[in-house]
Amino acid sequence: MYFKMRKLQLIFISLCISLLLIASDNTKVTDTKTFRISKNLSIYNSVFRELDAFYVDTLNYDKMNVNAINEMLSKLDPYTVYIPEKETESLKFMTTGEYAGIGALITKSGKDIYVSEPYEGMPAQRNDVRAGDIILEVDGKSVAGLSVSDVSARLKGTPNTVIRLKIKRTGVQKPVEKEFMREKIQVNPITYSALVAPKIGFVQLSDFTDKSAIELKSAVNELVKNYQIESLIIDLRNNGGGLIDEAVKIVGFFVPKGSEVVQTKGKNKFTDRTYKTPQEPAFPNLQLAVLVNRSSASASEILAGAIQDLDRGVIIGERTFGKGLVQNIRPIGFGGHLKITTAKYYIPSGRCIQAIDYTHRNEDGSVGRVPDSLTTEFSTRNGRKVRDGGGIVPDVKTNDDRKMNIAYYIYAQNLYFEFANQYTAKHPTISKPAEFQLDENDFMEFKSFLNDKKFTYTTESEKMYKEFLDLAKSEGIEKYADSELKALEAKLKPDIERNIDDNKSDIIELLSLEIIKRYYFQKGEIEFSLKTDVDLKAAIEKLNDKAFYQKLLSAEK
């Protein structure tokens, strides 16, 4: 008995010593970490003070500090950013879609600040502020020389305060003056909803703010009520994401309560969380298709990925962006915030779809996508094979085969916008978006407009050729292929007249979109573009093919 007790005592003492050693090691690690943080902060403080004391010119302390912070964060990932106090309004807009102002987008072309797009039903549109109007003054102060962000800040303000605008309008000789009230602007994340085929509804979701789920549910309820839809298309193309909770709620409209949608895992335990659907599904029997493209990211990928992993709908379009990182916003004093990557997320199959590994950079600081050969295979609920590490790969892939032709160089120089200003001054009304069509006279008029503007452009191929030629000259080898190089240069130089005619359809499409939104705003622009939408056509086709739909989601061979 004595020896047994003695043995237990020795074991207990050994455990205590082990725990003390572990605690000691942890203390050492903590102390080392604390020392390193303190040391580097002390170095930074000393450098700042030495610069203040001895640098030859006057220093802008705030700017230097922001530059130092931004440079430090830029080495981590593009989502970890410092948000100074003056940008807190944009922080609120990111999460709520809400701000106080006039309800219009603005842009800069040359030296002028233009209204590019008033939101339908908002103060600017209701008070006849139009796309194409040049802003001259805000509240009696000239905006000459100001940036877009500076003018935007002047347009915003406290709700129910008066704003006075002086604007220059195409076709009107004297400046136009407007006076009306700023209002609380709530941008609806549902940019468009409609019946797009018999029994098939369509909803376009632009982002995931705190009202996205309730607005989507409302839009779908209207489609069910008015058209008795049996299938739904959710358009997440160009949706860069937002709040995880909203994506989870939306998934919950279509799958059983308590279904696991996403897990987040990070360095600190407070970032580890499992998100499950919080309510019974509102639309358990609707067939579902989700449209995605390379700009669908973050919460869009959680929604699309969960629908795919749970075998609840068909994903159509392009491979998504591949953002599997989660950010939190933390206050850091003096009104500033830090948006910081705190975790990775994992969708129901267990995969993380992060496409870029920011922890392993090349020698030049660049990062690359995870190659498909290094990704891992996972299974959906019904056994379909899916992979991690590179975004969501659609069940039905579509290709955008449009080239970066002259139509996009015209767009880059803002010439569709300028022509639309002249067009709207001459045409008080146009046909509805579904019926609108530019005729040959309109096209010829646009060609004359481009000629008057002395439109020209340099292709990316030309730029690369010039870089190659400079390299060839530096190596002294251009003389061996002089005639061939000159022939290639001649072929690369764009024939503007010919290229305009060859790409007439693309030019007319982009010009039509710019004109239509002057009369029917964002909804009209979307309605027009859906007429030739390849992804939408594929979604309607697959939803109508019941055999394909059932076979795909049940993983039948």
Image: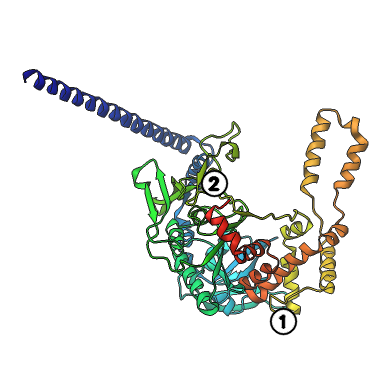
* On-image quarter of the N terminus: top left
Viewer-nearest residue: 230 or 354: 230
**Relative to residue 172, is residue 223 drawn left or right?**
left
- Name the residue located 80 percent from the left edge and 53 percent from the top edge: 457
The disc label shown at residue 385, or none: 2
In the image, farthest residue toward the left: 2
- Judged from the image, the secondary structure of the residue bearing numbered disc 1 is loop
Viewer-nearest residue: 545 or 239: 545
Percent coordinates x, y for residue 368 in the rendering: 60, 39
Q: Quote the CA–CA distance across marks 1 and 2.
A: 55 Å
Percent coordinates x, y for residue 107 in the rendering: 63, 63
- Judged from the image, the secondary structure of the residue bearing numbered disc 2 is strand
Percent coordinates x, y for residue 62 in the rendering: 47, 47
Residue 311 appears anywhere in the view: yes
Q: Amino acid at mark 1?
A: Pro
Q: Can you identify the residue that label 1 sits on?
A: 428
**Relative to residue 63, is residue 19 drawn left or right?**
left
In the image, farthest residue toward the front: 557
Residue 143 appears anywhere in the view: no
Query: Residue 405's image quarter?
Result: bottom right
Query: Residue 194's image quarter?
Result: bottom right
Q: Residues within 10 Å of mark 2 (few under 14, many from 20)?
A: few
Percent coordinates x, y for residue 541 in the rendering: 65, 64
Q: Residues within 10 Å of mark 1 (few under 14, many from 20)?
A: few
- Discs 1, 2 touching: Cβ within 8 Å: no
